[in-house]
Image (cartoon, helix red, strand yellow):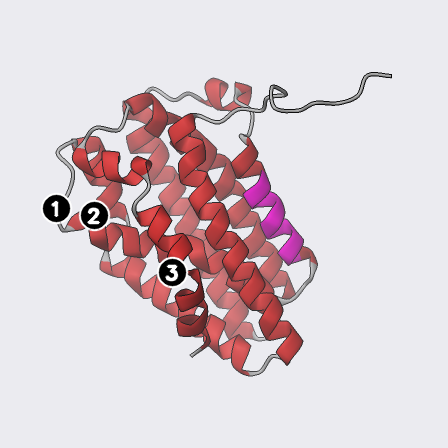
Amino acid sequence: MFTEKIRKKAEPIWQKSMQHPFIKELQRGELAEDKFRFYLIQDHFYLNAFTEIHKLAAECADNPEIKELFLNNIAGIEVSEVSVRETFFKELAITEEEIQQTMVAPAAYHYIAHMYKEAQSKSVGRIVAALLPCYWLYQEIGEELILNGSPTPLYQRWIETYDSEAYKTTVEAQKNLTNRLAAVASEDEVQLMEQAFLISSYEELYFWEMGYQKEEWSNKHVSLPIS
C-alpha cells in the first residue's frame, strides 16, 4: 500500500524523531519544563493552522464522505485544543496574553507554510499526505513512550493523549484515506503526495529540535553585504 511505501522511505527521519533528546528526556522525566512549555505554545500555533488546513481540505473535497471526515477531525482537534488549555496551559500558567506576545518560531512557521502550500494546490490527496505524519508519528511515539511511561505526571498525561483507542482509530482513518486517494491518483500526483509526506516528516523532526532549543529568529548566522 502507498502508506507502507512512504512510511518505509520516511523511516530514517522518523527514527531521528523517536530518538530526539526532547522525546527521550520527556520519557525519563528530565526534560526542562520551560522547553515543554515553549513547545506547547508553538504547538498551539501549529494546531490553529492544522485546523484551517482541514477546513480548506473539506472545501476541496467533492466526495461527501471525505468532506465529513475532515469536518469530524476538525471537531476532534478543537476538543483536544480545549483540553490542552484546561490542563497543560493551566498547570504551566500559560496565559492568552503570553500567547499573543509570543512570536511563531522558525520551525513552526516553516511547517505551517509547507501545509498551506499543499492546501493551495487544492489537491485533497496532497493535503491528506501532508497532514498524515502529524497524526501517525505521534501515535507511534505515544505507543513507544507508554511502554515505560514518564515519572513526571505532566509528561505522562501528554503521552497518554496519543495512546488512546480513539486516537488510533483516527490515525487509521487518515491512513486509509491516503491509500484510497493514492490508488486513483495519476503517477505525477502520487509523487507529489509522497513528497508532501516526506517534507512533513522532516518538519516534525525540526519541530522537536525547535522545542528543545527554544528556537528564536536570529540574524547571528546571516552575513549580508552592506551597501
- Image quadrant where one finds the C terminus: top right
Q: Which residue is mark 1?
A: 148
Q: Secondary structure at mark 3?
A: helix
x and y percentages locating residue 91 in the rendered image: 27, 24
Q: Single out the mark in the foreground, 3 or 2.
A: 3
Whether the magenta-drawn stretch holds residue 209 is answered as no
- Boundaries of the magenta span: 110-119
The answer to whether residue 163 of the structure is visible from this angle is no
Contact? badges 2 and 1 (CB < 8 Å): yes
Say few, some or many: other residues with alpha carbon within 10 Å of mark 2 (under 14 / 14 to 19 / 20 or more): many
Residue drawn 49% across the image and 78% down it: 180
Give the spatial CA distance, label 3 vs label 2. 18 Å
For residue 227, above or below residue 61: above
Residue drawn 12% across the image and 34% down it: 151
Q: Single out the mark in the foreground, 1 or 3.
A: 3
Q: Which residue is mark 3?
A: 11
Q: Secondary structure at mark 2?
A: helix
Amino acid marked by disc 2: Leu
x and y percentages locating residue 112 in the rendered image: 57, 44
x and y percentages locating residue 95 in the rendered image: 42, 20
Give the spatial CA distance, label 1 vs label 3. 22 Å
Position of 80 with respect to 65 (left or right) is left
Whether the magenta-drawn stretch holds residue 113 is answered as yes
The label number, if any, that marks residue 145 in the structure image: 2
For residue 206, above or below residue 193: above
Amino acid marked by disc 3: Glu
Q: Earlier in the sequence, mark 1 or mark 3?
A: 3
